[in-house]
Amino acid sequence: MRKIVHIDMDAFYAAVEQRDQPALRGLPIAVGGGQTRGVVMTASYEARRFGVRSAMPGARAARLCPELVFVRPRFEVYKAVSRQIRAIFRQHATLVEPLSLDEAYLDVTEPPNGPLPAVAIARAIKDQIRDETGLTASAGVSCNKFLAKLASDMEKPDGLCLIRPAQVLDVLAELPIERFFGVGPATASRLRAAGIRRGADLQALDEAAAVHRLGRSGAHYWRLAQGRDDRPVVPDRSRKSLSVETTFDQDIAGVTELTAALEELARDLAARLAQSGYQALTVHLKIKYLDFRISTRQTTLREAPRSAESLAAVGRHLLLRAPLAAPVRLLGIGVGGATTEAGQLTLGLDPQPADQG
């Protein structure tokens, strides 16, 4: 049986800003583009008490919390702190799979420092992060990745939660279906329409019945409801694409608002590209409309985009290339396809770029 730890930094971008700017400590802050244009990337816990959440339009966040302080993101700083944190991870585990700048899975089944309980390793990592960076992290410990990530969300912020094998079925029985790995809003609606509202509803079925009712994905959800997740922690996964997206609290019909959201997404994507070292020539834009139709627009460049400005420019080109079919509930941008050792971006857009929408 594996011993998996999931570490998730608490309100990472906002926490770094409050650490570096003492005047912001204790205040409700949002890292993002501001209330006129832009989207909240991370909200401090003081702001979350007012209902401010990531991916929320800045104007709505300001209405919820009139005292909200908007802070421009500093991705170079966040990347530097992320490198510190990952160095700590590698001291405690040989198998580390980063998911983003602020979270990772660690397989501590055979830790490099000798046999230790997984909870003790998680606590040591949390303490070392606090001592070396001045930041807090939440940790989840269990026997697989799904359960470890679930556990890290249970006692935020600065939490440490263990889901023991004997607790798994009881914990998952009460879990809303929306919190199962791979279940987004559209899938959750479909599952609820089929009478599946929480883990207990899946546990009441056998695997064949789950497949009959839910299709091929039914087996996946049924296994999760039993606490089964065989995915290993993979340190050097071969990446085929990298993307970011945001779901809006309210559907957006205006191109100006969507462009502002796109600029924030481009900054986030540029930071992740720089951190991962991944480069690719194809940029794609994902648009999900209020009726859940999805359109994907893409183009292939001569050189791989790396900066936020370059990504935003290509994204705007794709956004404006065709009229929107309806108000937008989700917007995403990503890169994929052929990889390259890219230099500076040349906007060598194809004369007739493919539109998969």
Image (cartoon, helix red, strand yellow):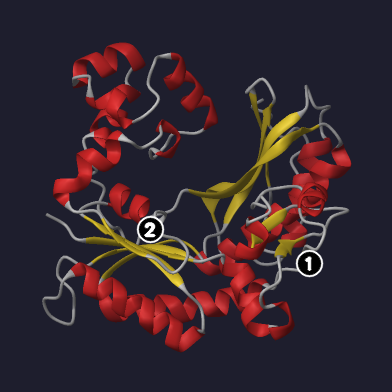
Q: Residue at x 40, y 59 (%)?
A: 155
Quarter location, residue 119: bottom left
Q: How many marks?
A: 2
**Res 230 → quadrant:** top left
Image position of 72 (left or right of 241)? right
Q: Residue at x 35, y 17 (%)?
A: 214
Q: Which label belongs to residue 69?
A: 1
Q: Identify which residue is drawn at 80% across, 63% down.
A: 67
Residue extending furthest toward the bottom: 132
* Residue 342 appears in the picture as rendered: no
Q: Position of residue 18 (x, y in %)?
A: 65, 77
Q: Quadrant of the C terminus?
A: top right
Q: Amino acid at mark 2?
A: Ser
Residue at the image position 38 percent from the left and 37 percent from the top: 180
> Which residue was labeled with disc 2?
152
The amino acid type of the residue labelled 1 equals: Val
Answer left or right for 258 relative to 186. Answer: right
What is the C-alpha distance between the residues marked 2 and 1?
28 Å
Image coordinates for residue 165, horizontal then vertical, percent = 15, 49
| Label 2: few (<14), some (14–19) or many (≥20) C-alpha neighbours in 10 Å | many
Question: Earlier along the polypeptide chain: callout 2 or callout 1?
Answer: 1
Query: In the image shown, does 227 or 94 lie closer to the viewer?
Result: 227
**Which label is found at residue 98?**
none
Displayed quadrant of residue 34: bottom right
Location of residue 197 in the rendering, given as x and y in whole percent from the top left corner: 40, 25
Secondary-structure class at tag 2: helix
Q: Quadrant of the N terminus?
A: bottom left
Give residue 191's position: percent from left, percent from top. Answer: 42, 21
Q: Indicate whether 71 appears above or below 161.
A: below
Answer above or below: position of 276 versus 301.
below
